[in-house]
Image (tube, coloured by chain):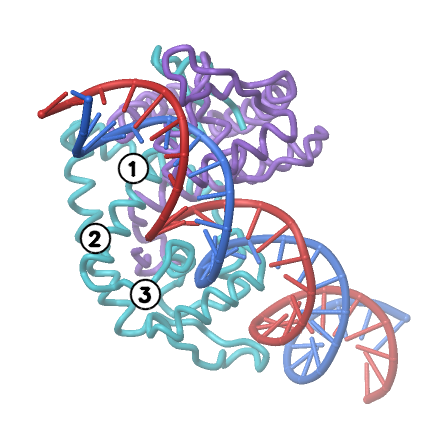
Chain colours: A cyan, B purple, C blue, D red
Amino acid sequence: MVRETDYNQGVALNIGLLLYIPYRALEDRVFEAVTAAGFTDITMAQSRVFQRISQHGSRVTELADRAKVTKQTASALVQALEDAGYVERVPDPTDARASLVRVASRGAAATAAASAEIGRIEAEWRRELGASRYDRLVRDLEVLQRLTDI
Amino acid sequence: MVRETDYNQGVALNIGLLLYIPYRALEDRVFEAVTAAGFTDITMAQSRVFQRISQHGSRVTELADRAKVTKQTASALVQALEDAGYVERVPDPTDARASLVRVASRGAAATAAASAEIGRIEAEWRRELGASRYDRLVRDLEVLQRLTDI
DNA sequence: ATAATTGATCAGGAACTCGTACTTCTTCTG
DNA sequence: CAGAAGAAGTACGAGTTCCTGATCAATTAT
């Protein structure tokens, strides 16, 4: 909760805002592209959880941790995703209490639409920064991601 | 809304997630620090709007644009911030319909608490990446911020 | 002078999010 | 081995966020 001291003067923003502003802009564009592709029944919060499903499926509690929401929130969002056909749930073979949330075919199709838009955005950002600078940015962000992720 | 193809294998995440994950982790830590400092009556959404107030004050509509929410949402959040003493409103001398939202002294104090925590986080990230790499990351992010911001 | 646009708030409602509580299953400890 | 402790996931209740549509007054455009 830092207020930039003088936005219009190009004074340095804090690192949090420097991460947030591009992220939020991308998120909006991707959301619009996904909606335009016909996936009109998914919300931003749902998609944020959806993104954290791993290839072999994820538990609700894992998704909660990784999306930084409570178990109840994750559970409700997963339920909505399942109802809309984006995910499916299968029993977790290692624990009778748990289930694995997996991406369903509708989810995979939506993912393809999102990926296409992200690719377009990346191309723009890469043009703006230059290829080597952009690639380095990605590598550096990967370091921060590994440092801060669950 | 892209699902990473295999999270545990360190496969590349999309740029959106690479920005979001560190950002979200920072946001949580800063929020906790601000709460611990006694500012327990502000919410995350309120602080996101608060952060976009410029030095000479901002209009509600400007905050809405910059925080990427509707005017009504911004108005409601500003009202809550004002009620809690974080901001004040003064008439905009250039337009009788508008007012300027400015940071009040309680807001400035909360900002100080947040800044201290951000400084601590930055020091960690700088240690992880190295100073020159971190500085370059910041500069690159500034380019993206300017490209995507309002 | 009139029409169109804009700044900000109201009203209503859905979605998001959390704390507390609970049941069942799994792991830990004596 | 048995009981205690902890974990997975959902239910309940409630506050917050966010949106659409609407409104009114001020400003800008024609």
The chain letter for the residue carrying disc 1 is A
Q: CA distance from mark 2 to mark 3?
A: 13 Å
Question: Where does residue A111 sit, x and y in percent of width and height?
Answer: 25, 61
Residue B4, located in which quarter of the rendered image?
Answer: bottom left
**Which residue position holds label 1?**
A138
Nearest to N terminus: mark 2 or mark 1:
2
Question: Is A148 situated above or below A54?
Answer: above
The residue located at (68%, 31%) in the rendering is B39
Query: Disc 2 vs disc 1: which is toward the camera?
Result: 2
Question: Where does residue A41 sit, x and y in percent of width and height?
Answer: 32, 65
Q: Amino acid at mark 3?
A: Asp
The residue located at (30%, 38%) in the rendering is A25
**Which residue position holds label 2?**
A33
The chain letter for the residue carrying disc 2 is A
Q: CA distance from mark 2 to mark 1?
A: 23 Å
Query: Disc 2 vs disc 3: which is toward the camera?
Result: 3
Same subunit: marks 3 and 1: yes
Please tell me how crowded label 1 is: few (under 14), some (14-19), or many (20+) other residues with Cα within 10 Å.
some
Question: Where does residue B25 sit, x and y in percent of width and height?
Answer: 51, 41
